[in-house]
Amino acid sequence: MGAYFKETNHMKNLLLGTALGLPLALTFTSVAMAEVGVSPTVWGVRTDKLEYRMGDEENSFAWGFAAWTGNDELRLVWKSEGAKIEGGDFEEMDNQIRLQKPITDFFDGFVGVAASTPDGAPERYHGAFGVTGLAPQWFEVEAALYVSEYPYIGAEVEYEALLTNRLTLTPSFEVTLPLADDPEREIAAGGGSFELGLRLSYDLIGRNVSPYFGVNYERAFGGTADILRDHGHEVDELTGVVGINFMF
Amino acid sequence: MKHTNFLRPLAVVLGLALGLPAYAGTYDITVDKVRIDTGTFKKNGIGYNGSQTPTILHFEEGEDVVIRVKNNLRESTSIHWHGLILPFQQDGVPGISFNGIKPGETFTYRFPIEQAGTYWFHSHSGFQEPDGAYGAIVISPKGGEAVPTDRDYVVQLTDKHPHSGSRIFRNLKASADYYNRAQRTAQDLIEDAGAEGLKAALQDRKMWGAMRMMPTDIEDVQGFTPLINGASTQQNWTGIFKPGEKVRLRLINSSATTYFDVRVPGLKMTVVQADGNDVKPVTVDELRIAVAETYDVIVQPREAKAYSIIGESAGRTAMVRGTLAPTAGMVGPYYKMRPQPLLTMADMGGMMSGMDHSGMDMSGFDMSGMDHSGHDMSGFDMSGMDHSGMDMGGMDMSAGMPVVPSEGAPGAAFYAPGSGLIPTAANGGKFLGYEDLTARKPLYRDRPATREIEIRLTGNMERYIWSIDGVKYEDADPIRLKYGERVRFKFVNETMMAHPMHLHGMWTIIDTGKGAYDPVKHTVSVAPGTTLYTETEVDAPGQWAFHCHLSYHAGGGMFRKVIVEGGPS
């Protein structure tokens, strides 16, 4: 059953990726400008994680990227995050497609759908409602409410400290707070988890290619941590990471 | 194009000898895809007549020109004759004057040349101009030049970037600081803390961080190679002179986004013309040429040696050297770039008057802590400079930021008092300001303006959105003017960048307080945090473009259509 389950799940992931990616790819047409003065549709792709994680027990590949297209008024964003154990399962697979619109000088509001489809766990689909932008003192922040039978709140903060104009130290903090029990996914209401990262990157080719290394630490709390302990799983994990970020 | 160029002087001579009426020249321009080589990088770009060396069109005042433009690109193109007074259908702005020139088509422009001076031309389609679609226009006056010279050279500057214009625009939209590689770093913090104390340095960071603004945000685009007449420093454009000769340099800034500070070390420059109109000669050591402006200067090298023409970007991120030499093959000296300036709170002045203060915590702001942090003078020779206009005492935070030009400081009248952008000459001498420009002969009789129109220059730096009165071109109604009126434009710059504003088809007279002798220009740079007044005699019917000439600001929406209603009876 396991093999079959995995197979279909991979198919599903592939289908999902295509379904999400295709409309974006189609809109990534050339920046054709008939008239000067009329702002064209633009696009971008940027990873904030594309890395190999070295842990105590297992190693994995992890990614996080956003691809977007649109104009000053509206952007269509595909955000993807995931991790695959080396030689094993996709233990994390999250894709979001959202419409993002400026609501203040520095912040966008967004609505979208989020799909969480890792291997070996039931799929979850959420409606996403949130804000993302640049807070005073240059903190990049995002907060969203994910609505479904298993609602949760997700938030991220990131800061890029320029050691030089090419060498950047980026601390990041990501927190998830479940609002309902989801035992099949080893999640308890109120039992939050966070991910803390510190990455040192160097812009090798413009801003297009930036290799980095760093550390990543994840930890679960409360009821979620209890469930993990009961199942004999670790409640935290510290990994060393090496990766390359791309921006196009 | 070449053949007409060779034959034209002959035809003119023949025409004069035979007493023929005004010469009607025909000029051919092809718009081609070219390979651009700056010596440091190669890229595909656009060139006129198949060359990265800008084409120079030589016209005579009074001539009727016919210009056939063949589009060899795979996309539509256009040519706008920057600064020329002509029927609006000939102005070359797709969507406003005509429909553009389709791939493979030849469009024929026809218009009379009613003026003299130095101008330029460029594509008004997409980002073709940053990609290389620009050239120069030199129009000889009917009665000969007011100040005759022995030599006459076009010195056309540009900021050639390895990325295409559309890619630059996209990158800026993705991240407004994409090209800013002069940002303040941890290293700068340590240095500033050493110089001013940690508290002051941190307070300064906190203040800028609260606004989410960068004091280093002077040039939108860095990483370019500046060129003079299509040649980089190492390719070394050279103009030949004999010692003692007077050399006229027709400076044209055809950059996409870069202001240049231009000097010829060892020589005084006598400015005789600005934007094609003669001015009373004024002798300076250095001048700042905004994007799309032109200045004619006369230099007189007396020694048989190589002199350098230095164009240093206003943000001090790039520099180009050309050479004036008695023989070809000589190379003028190269100079070290001066330190990078930083914007000050004065440059933010307009933003604060125009924006909501809620996001700004000024409680920790102490003016004494800012004295030097925002304005590194260490590399400047201040001996020749009057500090009165730089008095920081004039900046009273509680009373709001001043937004009117300061008085007194040389070259500073059109900057916010205490601005980090106020230029100083490399040798400590005279730096040209708009206040130094006086029309040689009034072009119009002086009369009071019939009405005033306020033009607020607005934007969102973080999102890289640019607009006028908070509205982008695509969402804006045209500005309607009446033929025969004299409009006074009040430009209020509410952003922290300088904007070179260009009105097509009609002259822009900068109010410098000289009445009929105010300088007449086609492009006027409005410094951050300042208010500047211009007047325009509305004497050209039709519809015209009016925009910031920074390519990516115009492309983003800092642009208007101007409709002139009515016409000569």
Image (spheres, grey):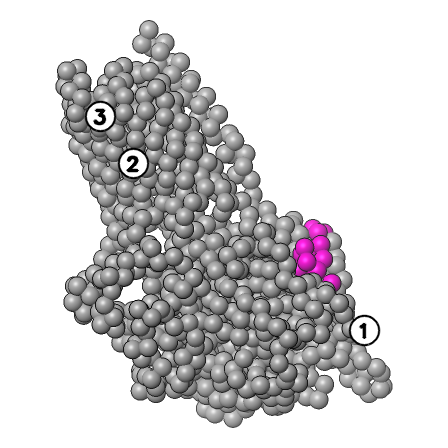
Quadrant the N terminus of chain B occupies:
bottom right
- Alpha carbon of mark 1 to alpha carbon of mark 3: how far? 80 Å
- Which residue is nearer to you in this view: B3 or B97? B97
Looking at the image, is A222 positioned above or below residue B522? above
What residue would you read off at disc 3? A190
**Horizontally, is B177 left or right of B446 in the view?**
left
Query: Which residue in the rendered view is the most extreme toward the front?
Result: B399
**Res A244 seen here:** yes
Amino acid type shown at disc 3 = Gly
Q: Are marks 1 and 2 on the same chain?
A: no
Q: Which mark is residue B569?
A: 1
Residue at image x 48%, y 92%? B302
Q: Main secondary structure of the magenta part?
A: loop
Q: Chain of mark 1?
A: B
> Which is in the foreground here, disc 2 or disc 3?
3
* Neighbour tally class for label 1: few under 14, some 14-19, many 20 plus, Cα within 10 Å: few
Magenta stretch encompasses residue B320:
no
Question: Residue A242, located in which quarter of the rendered image?
Answer: top left
Q: Which residue is mark 2?
A: A155
Q: Amino acid at mark 1?
A: Ser
Image coords of residue B265 (percent x, y) = 41, 83
Residues at marks 2 and 3, common chain? yes
Residue range in magenta is: B88-104
Spot occupied by residue B454 in the image (x, y as percentages of width and height):
54, 67
Picture residue at 72% right of the left edge, 65% below the top:
B565
Nearer to me, A130 or A27: A130
Q: Nearer the viewer, mark 1 or mark 2?
A: 1
> In the rendering, which numbered label is found on residue B126?
none
With respect to residue B61, does B253 lie above or below? above
Q: Chain of mark 3?
A: A
Residue A119 on image: x %, y %: 32, 18
